[in-house]
Image (spheres, rainbow, N blue to C red):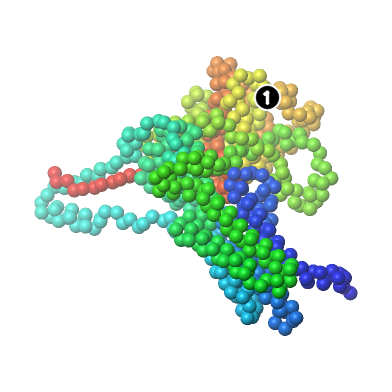
Amino acid sequence: MQVFSKILRTLWNLWELRALVLLSLSLQIILIIFSNRRKYSKGNLIRAIIWLAYLSADWVATVSLGVLSNGQGDNSQDDQSYVIMAFWAPFLLLHLGGPDTITAYALEDNELWLRHLLGLIVQVGVAFYVFVRSLKPSQLNFAAIPIFVAGCIKYGERTWVLWSASSQNFRESLLPRPDPGPNYAKFMEEYILKKSEGFVLSWDATQVSHDEANNSAATRERLSDVVILNAAYDFFLIFRRLFADLILSFQDLEKSLLFFRDIYWEDAFKVIEVELGFMYDVLYTKAPTIYSLWGVARRFTCILSTTTALLAFCIIDWHKYLLVDAIVTFFLLVGAIGLEIYAILLLLSSDWTSRWLSNHWSGKPNNWLRFITSKKKWSNSMAQYNLSCSCLKSEPTICCKILKLACIHRTIETYLSGNSEDVPQYLKESIFKQLAGRSRRAPQFGVRKELCALRADQVLQQENCKHELGWSFDFEFDHSILLWHLATDLCYFCDIESDGKDPRISSKLLSDYMMYILVKRPYMLPNGIGQIRFQDTCAEAMEFFQENKITIFNEDACQKLLKVEIIIPPSEIKGDRSKSVLFDACKLAKCLRSMEREKQWGKQQKWEIINQVWVEILSYAANQCRWNHHAQQLRRGGELLTHVWLLMAHLGISEHYQISQGHARTKLVVL
């Protein structure tokens, strides 16, 4: 029994290959247009489109080649149709090569380069089989040769880029040259020889510290776009080793400190943005192979090949083929040329080309550079998640219940829940000033490295309130985040009429951002039981809200929470049964409010201190996050945590520096 009628089966057999080939071209157009936008967009719709197109593109092209290889053009009366359809095989190789704007959707795709290499061998073999099978005394076969060359180039480029961006090969490519150091055996031989001659010897080890080298700091002034672009590229060549989990040298620290200590905060973040843009291109696009002399040559070879094929097809007698097949072929040719032209335009408008032009074009194309450097580099946003508001959300709808029944509700919530806010300028300024101040106050590198392990000790010590507030950091890191998140919320709504808007608002944004990281990106934080604490705290908060008939979290809700007397520590009552921190957070909020009276703080000063504490929490989280998790965020519009992590490395606050001696020059001294 046939499920589909004979007419439907005939129609499918007639249009199967044509539809697949056109779908493959459409997916390539979608990828080249949208894939580069994920560098600066956090939109879930864009990510979903790119994800579907990326996964479907290879599958559609592979299936199309399989259908072509099963064609019956050898002995059927549709001989001419098979010849023109076989002409489509090289185009499918072009599509398998993919656009220049995306080679890997996620970092893990780079690790599958060996699978793509096998796919390259197999698919090129299949395309060549289809081509040989269709060899007839026809001019169309000659027009297929340049497309076949372009397809092999594109597919080979993609495989090579995946191989070079894989963690092992990327790491090996960045390893420094082996340095044996001074010849120890010869030094000791000279030492023993002189000692045997009766000399009284000693040795003098002179060292050059980075602080001495930094005394000649540059004058503080705003940087031009060209200077920012060139500085970002130079630092990218050095600090890309962070994304391979390699250490940095004394010279790297010296160069970075000399530049970053004496520039404006805005310029510092611009350099970081461009630097991470270069890193995104290396990990997820064909940048390593196209931004070179041979890469440009291959681009022009591809566009010349496709243009030659189009001209050849126009010259030959294509009327002898079916009109629909001729139209599909025209679409493929024009689409291939259009994709190549668009790729060249993207190449010309990239930061890589801008840097090359600024260094090699004596005319200094300022307008061109200004246009390119003004393009958006990352989303400049920070996701928000509020525990109190999540506890008061409405009852789940029928749709949500169905998704929960299908066990995919958490995946959907990850993409749909929460919102994002732009990173305020005040917050960037406070982050840079606080981190630069920490770097300056640590004259020795060992002391600066110890700052990586601090949470908020320095801030509380400087403000003389460690005795009153230090207990909030005696727990695991996720525990402290939850405590300060709820305490910040309570203070925020109680100080609704506060005049100090900038530190108060930025503290709230940072608080909700770190809660988002804790709930939605827990792998970016140190190991802990944050999810359990979050769930228990939510359960206790919901119970309290229901008992007090609270439907919205506002000043009244905060006052009701703060009215609860906290005499016995909550942990002694709950024991190990619950990990909730709700009333510990109330205790912290009361401490913060009481400090206004005891320390005679104004609300502005209190919020500045809270803001500094959150910057410390942010920087600690950034430094504890693994490099591969930072790299993953580059394809999701970028993450403030990643920008702070790289800024800390530039200021020497990083565990990637293994420096104890600096430049050591030892010589023998005759006493």
Residue drawn at the location 57% of the way across and 20% of the way down? 604
Badge 1: residue crowd in 10 Å (few <14, some 14–19, many ≥20) = some
In this orientation, which residue lies closer to the viewer: 569 or 498? 498
In x, y percent, where is residue 478?
Answer: 60, 39
Q: Can residue 237 be seen here?
A: yes
Q: Secondary structure at mark 1?
A: helix
- Residue marked by disc 1: 493
Residue drawn at the location 71% of the way across and 49% of the way down? 411
Give the quadrant of residue 605: top right
- The residue most toward the bottom is 75
In x, y percent, where is residue 228?
Answer: 45, 40
Instruction: Point out the image quarter for the N terminus.
Output: bottom right
Please tell me how many numbered marks the rendered image carries: 1
In x, y percent, where is residue 155?
Answer: 57, 65
> Left or right: 98 with respect to 582?
left
Give the quadrant of residue 487: top right
> Left or right: 5 with respect to 170?
right
Residue drawn at the location 63% of the way across and 19% of the way down? 498
Instruction: Point out the image quarter for the C terminus.
Output: top left
Q: Is residue 560 above or below residue 290?
A: above
The kind of residue on which mark 1 rests is: Phe
> Left or right: 507 with respect to 71?
left
Q: Can residue 17 be seen here?
A: no
